[in-house]
Image (tube, rainbow, N blue to C red):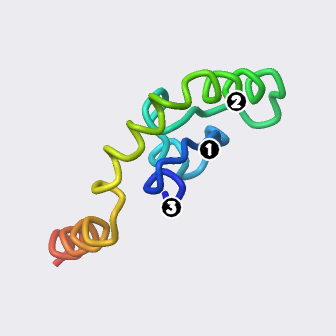
Amino acid sequence: MEAIACGTPVVGINAGALPETINTGETGHLYERGNIDSFTAALETAISDLSNLRESCLEHREALGVERTLKTLADLYDDIQ
């Protein structure tokens, strides 16, 4: 999230929380765990489209900020009560 907020696209494994954080083609690319060809393709795609991804990352900055995260958590806690 920090990398994206700084305008750096991320290439990450399609597992855990990363699919919720990385928007393919907008803030980076996902690849399948253990698949070197998938990793290579994701990395090459991210590098070839770096300027567009960088701009898109910066556009997503607000959605990844601490204030938004805290509001989301507060809303979740309110729903529980």
Q: Is residue 15 above or below residue 51?
A: below
Residue 43: give its label: 2
Q: Is residue 50 or residue 68 the one in the foreground?
A: 50
How many residues crowd mark 1 within 10 Å: few (<14), some (14–19), many (20+)? few
- Give the distance between the C-alpha atoms of the residues marked 3 and 1, in whole angstroms: 18 Å
Which residue is nearer to you in this view: 52 or 65? 52
Closer to viewer: mark 3 or mark 1? 3
Residue at position x 37%, y 47% in the image: 58
Q: Residues within 10 Å of mark 2 (few under 14, many from 20)?
A: some
In the rendered view of the protein, which quadrant contains the C terminus?
bottom left
| Residue at 71% in and 21% down | 41
Q: Earlier in the sequence, mark 2 or mark 3?
A: 3
Q: From the viewer's perspective, is the residue at label 1 or at label 2 nearer?
A: 2
17 versus 34 height, above or below: below
Q: Amino acid at mark 1?
A: Ala
Amino acid type at mark 3:
Glu
Pointers 2 and 3 in contact (CB under 8 A)?
Answer: no
Does residue 6 sit above or below 75 in this rendering?
Answer: above
| Residue that numbered label 1 is attached to | 15
| First of labels 3, 1 by sequence position | 3
Find disc 3 in the rendering and name its residue. 2
Q: Residue at x 65, y 42 (%)?
A: 12
Where disc 1 sits, the SS reads loop
The percent coordinates of residue 20 (x first, y second) are 45, 46
